[in-house]
Image (cartoon, rainbow, N blue to C red):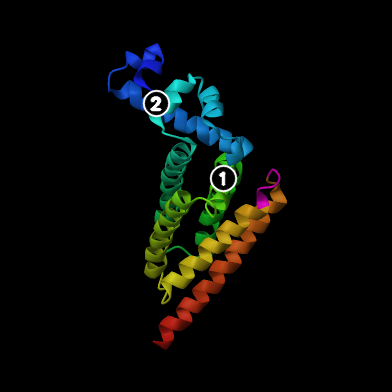
Amino acid sequence: MTQVDDLPEDILRMPPSKKGARRKSDIIDAALRLIGKEGLQGVSMRTVAAEASVPLGTATYYFSDKEDLIEAAFVRHSQRETARVVGTIARLGGNLTAAEIANRLADYIIQGLTEYRTQLITEHHFLNESARRTKLQRASAAWLQSLQAHLEATVTAMASTSPKTDARLILAVLAGLEVDSLSAPLEPANERAIRATLKRLFVSLSLVWAEETTSQ
């Protein structure tokens, strides 16, 4: 742990204010950029400090070790991605057809694979590594459970009689489409395939929901 006397002069003069919070936030964002480019193996206190353009002592002032920083980075990522996912799920309400629901989710997937590609790669680094890191495993499980709960509420409103199963199925298909398309830049043919897959999924689900509702 860094001692107070070892801290950079700017940190010693820094009041407990927005300036300090911004510095800590910049270090977390630097860690996320590194993970997206190099994976978690590229993260150390020294490499993150260099990426954030701050002295090493600044990074160790805010984070006790690499594991502490990685956990904070995952929390930051999950907060941002949850907002994006929940925003998409909220737009699935109303009297949308199966094809319209599929198109809105396809827009979300395609946006993730283009505008948010680095963040998506970062996410999969986190999820893969969570099998080996207990703290990360707990954080990733809580995040996935949150997404599942939001989607369960939405499919319940769509007349699903098995919302837990249907939400799990939809999340699995979305994750699979992301993984299948991450290895190379997205091409128009891939976009069409994503849309076709999701349309088939939701047309099938809507038929199941209608049949189950009728049989009740």
Circle 1 — which element?
Answer: helix
Circle 2 — which element?
Answer: helix
Name the image quarter holding the C terminus: bottom left
**Which residue is tagged 1?**
120
**Nearest to N terminus: mark 2 or mark 1:** 2
Q: Which three-letter amino acid code belongs to the residue tagged 2?
A: Tyr
Mark 2 → mark 1, Cα distance in angstroms: 29 Å
Q: Can residue 92 be seen in this view?
A: no
Is the residue under label 1 in contact with that under label 2 (CB below 8 Å)?
A: no
**Which residue is tagged 2?**
61
User: Where is 20 relative to 193, above or below?
Assistant: above
171 or 141: nearer the eye? Answer: 141
Q: State which region is magenta.
A: 181-185
Q: How many labels does the image show?
A: 2
Q: Residue at x 39, y 26 (%)?
A: 61
Name the image quarter holding the N terminus: top left
Locate residue 69, reporting x and y percent. 45, 36
20 or 65: nearer the eye? Answer: 65
User: Where is 175 relative to 45, above or below?
Assistant: below
Q: Which residue is drawn at 41% across and 32% down?
A: 63
174 within the magenta span: no
Which residue of the protein is positioned furthest toward the bottom in this rendering?
215
Locate residue 175, reporting x and y percent. 57, 57
User: Where is 145 relative to 3, above or below?
Assistant: below
Q: Residue at x 50, y 73 (%)?
A: 206
User: Where is 175 relative to 187, above or below?
Assistant: below
